[in-house]
Image: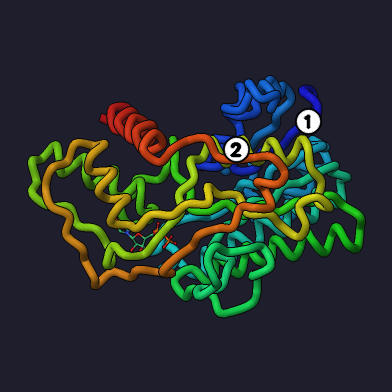
Amino acid sequence: MKSDSKIYVAGHRGLVGSAIMRRLTSPSPHAGEGRGEGGYTNIVTRTHSELDLTDQRAVDEFFEKQKPEYVFLAAAKVGGINANNIYRADFIYQNLMMESNIIHASYKHGVKKLMFLGSSCIYPKHAPQPMKEEYLLTGLLEPTNEPYAIAKIAGIKMCDAYNRQYGTNFMSVMPTNLYGPGDNYDLQGSHVLPALIRKMHEAKMQNAKEVVVWGTGSPKREFLYSDDLADACVFLMKRCSAVDVGEFINIGVGKEITIREAAELIAEVVGFRGQLVFDTSKPDGTPRKLLDVSRLDALGWQAKTGFREGIAKSYADYLQAVASTA
Ligand code: GDP
């Protein structure tokens, strides 16, 4: 991938896509280690209203006209445990359609390299921890996000099938739970960290005594800052091919914390001094979701942003988002 290569970032306004955009246009946190300075100048994007990615004909026409050389497939319908559990049909339909259309059009129009972004929820609910890439399809999935996970597994298998049948260079990467600037702060649809940032901030402002945390607080999660993920994606896109990464590769930090610990740290960063109350009528979801990142580590990439630093940056982003809508 050269600085003037034509790069299509699908989903450029989302948490992942916007981080990839920042990384393509500005230096890597690893810049001092020769990881590249950004400066990609030929990036093409389309908003949802300009291009409906579930529309096969529209996607095909877009690829025919634009002829991108590199594609980051970061467009997806995403959400937290509640949204995944309720909008089950939307999650499987929209994700299958978007990835099918983009992967097929990339093959048809000669894309040099494509990167498909998946999720750690593809692994079996009771997979041994940390989860190695080879545990895919060795057990039953977590029911709350099964439709989303099935769509993401289909994306991995599509990339692999196109590589084997047509000799394409389509790489799949599986990030762990993500957070960062531009996150979804809607309390019903969001993931745990943006939800807790918002709840704690609002509780602080209203001098409330309690914040409700869903579930028991005992599930463990691994959290990766979105700019770190973007750095890993650009690193892999530049340096690696599908043959180097195998069927897909995990991207994570290799460490996990409990939801209770995450909530306590957010309270500290936000400055909320009241009580945490655990609402056990809400689901815990999968008990653990820790990725084994040794394959990525061996390729020479590690995450840089510590959890406290990432939460502080995310809180600053939340404050900005609140200020801009006030
Ligand atoms: P998951 O990783 O797919 O389960 O997605 P989430 O990020 O939505 O949830 C992670 C864990 O955090 C689950 O055990 C949730 O029950 C718990 N959790 C605690 N409070 C909240 C909250 O306010 N919102 C969300 N989405 N999850 C919460």
- The image position of residue 114, as x and y in percent, is 76, 46
Residue under pointer 1: 6
* Number of other residues with Cα within 10 Å of mark 1, as a class: few under 14, some 14 to 19, many 20 or more: many
Q: Identify the residue shown where x is 32% and y is 35%.
A: 315
- Where's ligand 1: which quadrant? bottom left
Looking at the image, can residue 182 be seen?
no
Q: Residues within 10 Å of mark 2 (few under 14, many from 20)?
A: many
Q: Closest to the observer: 62 or 158?
A: 158
Give 134 or 162, whichever is nearer the viewer: 134
Residue 150, numbered circle:
none
Looking at the rendered structure, the kind of residue marked 1 is Lys
The vertical placement of 258 against 44, above or below, is below
The residue under the point 51% across, 40% down is 226
- Residue 289 lies left or right of residue 259; in this view the side is right
Between tags 2 and 1, which lies in front?
Answer: 2
Compared across the picture, whether 310 is left or right of 325 comes to: right
Displayed quadrant of residue 291: bottom right
Give the image location of residue 125, x and y in percent: 50, 73
Which part of the image, by quadrant, shows the N terminus? top right
Quarter of the image with the C terminus is: top left
Residue type (three-letter) at the residue carrying disc 2: Ala
Of labels 2 and 1, earlier in sequence is: 1
Whether tag 2 and tag 1 are in contact, CB under 8 A, the answer is no
Residue 154: % across, % down: 68, 66
Give the Cα separation between the discs numbered 2 and 1: 18 Å
Position of residue 273 in the picture relative to residue 180 (left or right) = left
What label sits on residue 230 in the rendered view?
2
Q: Secondary structure at mark 1?
A: loop
Which quadrant of the view contains residue 179?
A: top left
Image position of 70 (left or right of 263):
right
Which of the two residues, 190 or 304, is positioned nearer the viewer here? 304
